[in-house]
Image (cartoon, grey):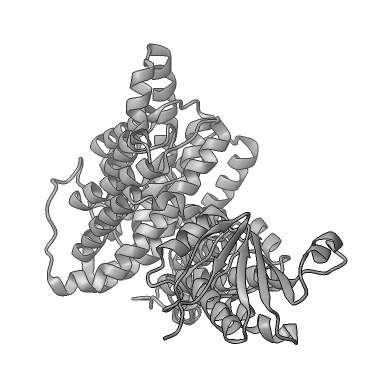
């Protein structure tokens, strides 16, 4: 990688020259995004098992650093719905100290992934896996808000999906009709504003209207203040979490999951931004900036953060041109927390539940989910299995099983299109006429890897007679792995045992260099790579 791949886009923009016109556009965009981010950050903080303050702190601290140190010009960072499930699980098991430790460890993993070039590999995660687990997370987020939306008196709600809904059904007779009215009215207002005034900050308008209605009518509904108490103004002082070796061992899987989700969503958001702006992000630096942001967010007691697609798109549509817009959005959020923290206590929980129901619907990508259900059986299986495992088992398990299953399906397809086939005499009659009697020619198509290795070992049996020599045409082989090389050695050994020599024709540079690095080559066989025209001869050492 070039040194420029790890240069923050903020420095690139400053080097280009930054004038008053750009500053004015970025400040307007930053204010617009901050207005959108206020209710989202609060709602996501609550849904994650923390409080509105942690959501806002994350958007301020991590959002500023993601813009300042990231590899995208217009990325907006902060808490997102993708983290809700894993964060709530970590808080339930290990408290905020465990979450802070997991967030900071995830930051270190992201930095290592960025410098290790993993950013370029994230794009190979299959779409059915991404869609399956994001849709599953959306269902879990929506499910977690049913109690607040209906004002149910459920007591402590189980974390498991099935048990949670069983608790809701048992408490269905305790519906608070005032809370349902506030939640339903907020949801309706958001939907109407999105259709009638798509540029209006629908979420903020809805929670302000709900708060005013609750205060003016003295509605008996739960609010942020009645549940969490008064919210302190400003940011907390940074502090190091209380850690133990046992806790670190227990949170490592969660840290890797947080890092994976942060990397996937950040790079996906950056790619969407590239399509909207025509610029190109730096994936390595984006992961590095994301890692630093998560470490510092943890020090301030915040939540995990990543690139937020909806807020990034809002920034672009509002005219944001450089990372200064994202940094300004964080400054405006800080001013809001500093000056209006007391007003947050009047926000009804049912209104925030309505906001999160809309967030969940946006995350579900229902249209894409339905399209993928029309794909082939393998892709459908990956999509549905990842979706169900996310809801019913565990997000980490869902990702691991989904990616593994997708890789297995891909290798099966590759093996179906790769193999060793005899050359049809009718295909190239002149070549057949030039070859001596007893010489067989095979063509290998596709990579020689462990999924097709057995094809080679069975090749001699398909000949049906003992040839004097076997020529393998390899011009269509782009790659050979260790298992493929071992299978090639077995093929050479079996052919030699039947009195036939093996010649490789048209071996590309990459496979040839890989074979040359094998030590010992072919499990004890001596390899002589001598070009005779386009042929490479493979022989075994003389016996005795």
Q: Say left or right for 333 vs 376.
A: left
Residue drawn at point x = 28 percent, y = 45 percent: 293
Residue 46 is drawn in which quadrant?
bottom left
- Counting the numbered discs, the total is 0
Name the one closer to the observer, 495 or 171.
495
Q: Position of residue 362 (x, y in %)?
A: 56, 53
Residue that sits furthest to the front in the current view? 544
Determine whether 386 is above or below 280 in the image: below
Q: Position of residue 76 (x, y in %)?
A: 41, 39
Residue 443 is drawn in which quadrant?
bottom right
Name the one closer to the observer, 87 or 444.
444
Name the one closer to the observer, 206 or 363.
363
Name the one closer to the observer, 125 or 343.
125
Image quarter in which the N terminus is found: top left
Q: Position of residue 426 (x, y in %)?
A: 88, 66
Determine whether 334 is above or below 447 in the image: above
Q: Say left or right for 212 vs 172.
A: left
Determine whether 37 is above or below 484 in the image: above
User: In the rendered image, is residue 87 in sight?
Assistant: no
Residue drawn at point x = 73 percent, y = 74 percent: 440
Q: Say left or right for 522 vs 326.
A: right
Residue drawn at point x = 73 percent, y = 84 percent: 462
Residue 338 is drawn in which quadrant?
top left
User: In the rendered image, is residue 241 in sight?
Assistant: yes
Image quarter in which the C terminus is found: bottom left
Residue that sits furthest to the top in the current view? 20
Q: Position of residue 439 (x, y in %)?
A: 73, 73
């Amino acid at each position: 990688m070039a040194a420029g791949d790890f240069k923050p886009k903020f420095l690139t923009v400053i080097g280009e020259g930054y004038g008053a016109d750009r500053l004015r556009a970025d400040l307007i965009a930053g204010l617009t995004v901050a207005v959108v981010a206020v209710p989202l950050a609060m709602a996501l903080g609550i849904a994650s098992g923390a409080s509105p303050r942690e959501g806002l702190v994350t958007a301020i601290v991590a959002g500023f650093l993601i813009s300042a140190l990231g590899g995208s010009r217009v990325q907006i960072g902060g808490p997102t719905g993708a983290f809700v499930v894993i964060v709530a699980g970590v808080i339930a098991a290990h408290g905020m100290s465990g979450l802070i430790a997991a967030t900071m460890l995830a930051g270190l993993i992201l930095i290592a992934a960025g410098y290790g070039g993993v950013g370029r590999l994230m794009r190979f995660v299959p779409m059915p896996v991404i869609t399956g687990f994001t849709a599953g997370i959306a269902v879990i987020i929506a499910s977690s808000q049913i109690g607040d939306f209906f004002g149910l008196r459920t007591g402590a709600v189980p974390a498991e999906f099935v048990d949670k809904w069983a608790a809701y059904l048992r408490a269905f007779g305790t519906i608070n009709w005032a809370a349902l009215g506030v939640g339903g009215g907020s949801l309706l207002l958001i939907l109407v504003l999105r259709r009638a005034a798509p540029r209006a900050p629908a979420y903020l308008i809805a929670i302000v209207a709900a708060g005013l209605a609750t205060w003016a009518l003295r509605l008996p509904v739960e609010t942020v203040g009645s549940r969490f108490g008064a919210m302190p103004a400003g940011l907390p002082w940074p502090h190091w979490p209380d850690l133990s070796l046992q806790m670190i061992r227990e949170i490592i899987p969660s840290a890797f999951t947080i890092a994976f989700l942060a990397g996937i969503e950040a790079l996906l958001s950056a790619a969407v931004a590239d399509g909207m702006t025509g610029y190109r992000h730096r994936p390595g630096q984006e992961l590095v900036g994301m890692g630093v942001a998560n470490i510092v967010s943890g020090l301030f007691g915040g939540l995990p953060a990543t690139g937020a697609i909806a807020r990034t798109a809002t920034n672009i549509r509002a005219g944001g041109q450089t990372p200064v817009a994202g940094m300004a959005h964080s400054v405006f959020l800080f001013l809001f927390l500093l000056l209006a923290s007391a007003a947050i206590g009047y926000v009804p929980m049912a209104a925030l539940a309505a906001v999160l129901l809309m967030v969940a619907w946006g995350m579900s990508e229902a249209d894409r989910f339905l399209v993928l259900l029309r794909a082939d059986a393998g892709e459908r299986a990956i999509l549905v299995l990842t979706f169900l495992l996310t809801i019913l088992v565990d997000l980490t398990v869902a990702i691991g099983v989904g990616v593994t299953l997708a890789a297995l399906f891909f290798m099966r397809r590759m093996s179906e299109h790769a193999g060793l086939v005899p050359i049809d005499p009718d295909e190239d009659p002149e070549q057949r006429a030039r070859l001596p009697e007893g010489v067989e020619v095979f063509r290998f198509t596709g990579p020689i890897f462990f999924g097709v290795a057995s094809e080679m070992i069975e090749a001699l049996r398909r000949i049906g007679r003992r040839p004097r020599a076997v020529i393998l045409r390899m011009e269509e082989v782009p790659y050979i792995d260790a298992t493929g090389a071992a299978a090639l050695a077995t093929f050479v050994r079996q052919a030699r045992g039947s009195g036939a020599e093996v010649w490789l024709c048209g071996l590309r540079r990459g496979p040839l260099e890989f074979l040359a690095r094998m030590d010992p080559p072919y499990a004890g066989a001596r390899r002589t790579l001598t070009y005779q025209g386009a042929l490479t001869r493979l022989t075994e050492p003389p016996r005795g």
